[in-house]
């Protein structure tokens, strides 16, 4: 059985392919730009908070709120090497996005 994250990515990929084949791309044109930007920003914040414990080398379980509270109450237990590597990866992604760095 594949891992949940691999399963989720695979399911998302097949859903995207199916929606393209069925012609559901027009639905994005029906949603106003501010609503779409707000939705995508909300998804980004949820992903960031959900991955924050792993980025800091901690093991938290539960909902997004539980993970956030766990990180907030266990700041003394951060694995600094893991946090530094995560910060470097985020910096590379933001730098590449900001300056349109071509990625193969």
Image: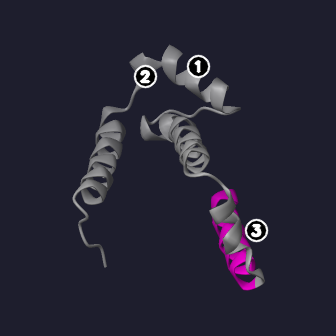
Helix or strand or loop: what does disc 1 sit on? helix
Q: Residue 49 carries which label?
A: none
Magenta part, dominant SS: helix
Q: Cβ–Cβ below 8 Å for labels 1 and 2?
A: no
Q: Name the residue under label 3.
A: 1
Q: Mark 1 points at which residue?
A: 69
Helix or strand or loop: what does disc 3 sit on? loop
- Is the N terminus in the top left, top right, bottom left or bottom right quadrant? bottom right
Q: In which quarter of the image is residue 56?
A: top left
Question: Between disc 1 and disc 2, whose residue precedes?
Answer: 1
Question: Between disc 1 and disc 3, whose residue precedes?
Answer: 3
Q: Cβ–Cβ below 8 Å for labels 1 and 3?
A: no
Q: Residue furthest top?
A: 73
Q: Report x, y in % for residue 18.
A: 75, 79
Residue drawn 63% across the image and 64% down it = 29
Q: Report x, y in % for residue 50.
A: 58, 38
Q: Name the residue under label 2.
A: 77
Could you give the CA–CA distance between mark 3 and mark 2, rounded to whole angstroms? Answer: 32 Å
């Amino acid at each position: 059985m594949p891992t949940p994250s691999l399963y989720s990515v695979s399911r998302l990929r097949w859903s995207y392919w199916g929606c393209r084949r069925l012609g559901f791309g027009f639905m994005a044109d029906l949603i106003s730009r501010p609503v779409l930007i707000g939705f995508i920003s909300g998804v980004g914040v949820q992903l960031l908070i959900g991955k924050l414990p792993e980025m800091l080398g901690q093991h938290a379980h539960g909902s997004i709120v539980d993970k956030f509270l766990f990180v907030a109450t266990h700041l003394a237990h951060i694995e600094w090497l893991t946090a530094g590597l995560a910060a470097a990866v985020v910096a590379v992604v933001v730098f590449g996005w900001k300056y349109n760095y071509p990625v193969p």
